[in-house]
Image (cartoon, grey):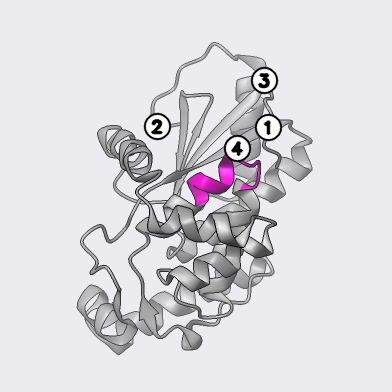
Amino acid sequence: MNDQGTALRIDVYSDVVCPWCYVGKRRLERALASAGTDVHVTWRPFQLNPTMPRFGMDRREYLEAKFGGPAATRSMYDRVTEAGAAEQLLFAFDRIQRTPNTFDAHRMIWHAGRFGKQERMVETLFRCFFVEGLDIGNVETLVQAATQVGLDRASTETFLVSDEGVEDVKGEESVGRRMGIRGVPYFVLNGAYTLSGAQPSEQFVAAFRQLESDPAARMAGY
C-alpha cells in the first residue's frame, strides 16, 4: 500500500489496540497484492475505549471488566490467535501489561501521515503493542516508534507535548461515529462501499472488482 494519489481510495477506521484490526490490515494487504490494485489508503482514528484513563489501566483488570473473566478472555485470545497465525501474525498477549489510552497513538498516526509514513507508523504501533507488549500510550514508546519509521526524535517530542493534531483527530473520529461505526476495523472504499470487520481477502477482492466494473455504484453496507 502506498500513500500517493491513486484510483482506489480506502479509508480504514481502526484502533491500534484492536487485534482484529491487525488481522484486517494483513488481509487487506493480501487482497491488494493478489488483485494488483493501485490504491491510496488512509488510516482513520477510532478509539475503542474513548473513556480510558489518560495513562491506561492494568490489562487484567481491563479484560475482566470487558469480557467477564479469564475464561471469556482466553476464548477471545484463542480465536484471534488462530486468525492471526493464518496471516503470519504471532500475537504475544501475555506480554501486554497495560491497556493504553490510544488518543496520542492516533495523533502520532495522523502526524506520520503528513510525512508519507502513515502506513509504516500503523504497522509499527501494532507490532509494538501486540508483539512486543509495549505501552503505546507512553510518550517515549511513541517517540521510539516515530524514530523507527524515520521521523525526527526532537520534532516528534515537541509534537507530542503540544496540542497539534488534537482537533484534527477528534474531527476525523467524529466523522466515523456520525457514519454509524460502532466497531473496527471498518473499511470505506471510494467513499461509498463499506466492509465491516476483518473480512477474508476474497471479500476485498470482490469489492475491488465491483468498483472497477461499476465505479459510479453506490452500495451502503456492501
Amino acid type assigned to the residue bearing label 1 in the image: Val
Which span is picked out in magenta?
109-117
Q: Earlier in the sequence, mark 1 or mark 3?
A: 1
Q: Position of residue 81 (x, y in %)?
A: 54, 75
| Distance (Cα) linking label 1 and label 3 | 12 Å
Q: Are marks 4 and 3 in contact (CB under 8 Å)?
A: no
Nearest to viewer (mark 1 / mark 3): 1
Amino acid type assigned to the residue bearing label 2 in the image: Gly
Q: Is residue 12 visible?
A: yes
The numbered mark at residue 212 is 3
| Distance (Cα) linking label 2 and label 1 | 20 Å
The numbered mark at residue 69 is none
Q: Nearer the viewer, residue 23 or 46?
A: 46
Q: Are marks 4 and 1 in contact (CB under 8 Å)?
A: yes
Residue annotated with mark 2? 221
Image height of 182 relative to 101, above or below: above
Q: Is residue 111 magenta?
A: yes
